[in-house]
Amino acid sequence: TLRWMEMMSNSPAVKEATQLAVGVAKNAEATLEQGAVLDPLAAGMAYLEGATPGSTTTRFPPEPSGYLHVGHAKASLLNDYYARRYKGRLVVRFDDTNPSKEKDEYQTSIIEDLGKIGVKPDVVTFTSDYFETIKQYALWMINNGLAYMDDTPQEQMQKERMDRQHSKHREQSPSEAMQYFKLMCS
């Protein structure tokens, strides 16, 4: 029975279900790894739903188009807190998808400023590192009728969203969407 208990406690589905049950009860948090000891929860902080020690990853995604501000500091400190508390890792992923606004100066400054407030990322990555993967997911979604291409002007798109109206492009066929996607990528 001990072997069965260990197997069950290592199951991702059981871990998630346990964390959800604990979250609903709002009384304590589950620790499934043998011997895992978590620091006491800091005053004012909530349990991180679904988090398990050793397998929690948080992400701070700044855009390297300016310097950090108070909102960035708050977000990075929260992500760092939970990554450390759950013995996980913090990933800083620079959202480098707008080259006209980005500068190496900002990227360097962001890493330096994070260090000044005690945030040390475990990994630094860039969204552009994943473009090919993102493209493959987009192609799969288009081919399966789960995505479409939309060139609706921003103001009109916002109005349609507020009015809960579907885009006129929503019924686009996968072949038509693929045509537009290939055009966009050329």
Image: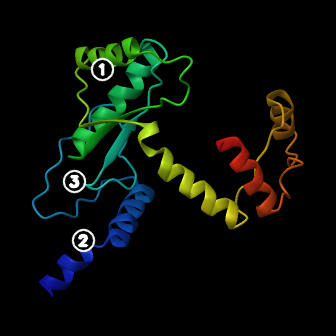
- What residue is shown with label 1? 111
Residue 13, horizontal then vertical, whole percent: 38, 71
Which of 93/183 is in front? 183
At 42% from the left and 61% from the top, the residue drawn is: 20
Residue 82, horizontal then vertical, whole percent: 30, 39
Structural crowding at the residue carrying mark 2, measured as other residues with C-alpha within 10 Å and reported as few (<14), some (14–19) or many (≥20) = few
Which of 113/148 is in front? 148
- The vertical placement of 5 against 132, above or below, is below
Residue 102, horizontal then vertical, whole percent: 49, 18
Report helix, strand or loop for mark 2.
loop
- The vertical placement of 108 against 61, above or below, is above
User: Distance between the Cα atoms at labels 2 and 1?
Assistant: 35 Å
Is label 3 in contact with label 2 (beta carbons under 8 Å)? Answer: no
Comes first in the chain, label 2 or label 1: 2
Q: The disc labelled 3 sits on which kind of residue? A: Gly
Q: How many marks?
A: 3
Report helix, strand or loop for mark 3.
loop
Does residue 161 appear left or right of residue 11 in this picture?
A: right
Q: The disc labelled 1 sits on which kind of residue? A: Ile
User: Distance between the Cα atoms at labels 3 and 2?
Assistant: 12 Å
- What residue is shown with label 2? 10
Structural crowding at the residue carrying mark 1, measured as other residues with C-alpha within 10 Å and reported as few (<14), some (14–19) or many (≥20) = some
- What residue is shown with label 3? 54
- List the single residue furthest toward the left: 35
Which of 71/29 is in front? 71
On-image quarter of the C terminus: top right
- The vertical placement of 173 against 61, above or below, is below
At 22% from the left and 79% from the top, the residue drawn is: 7
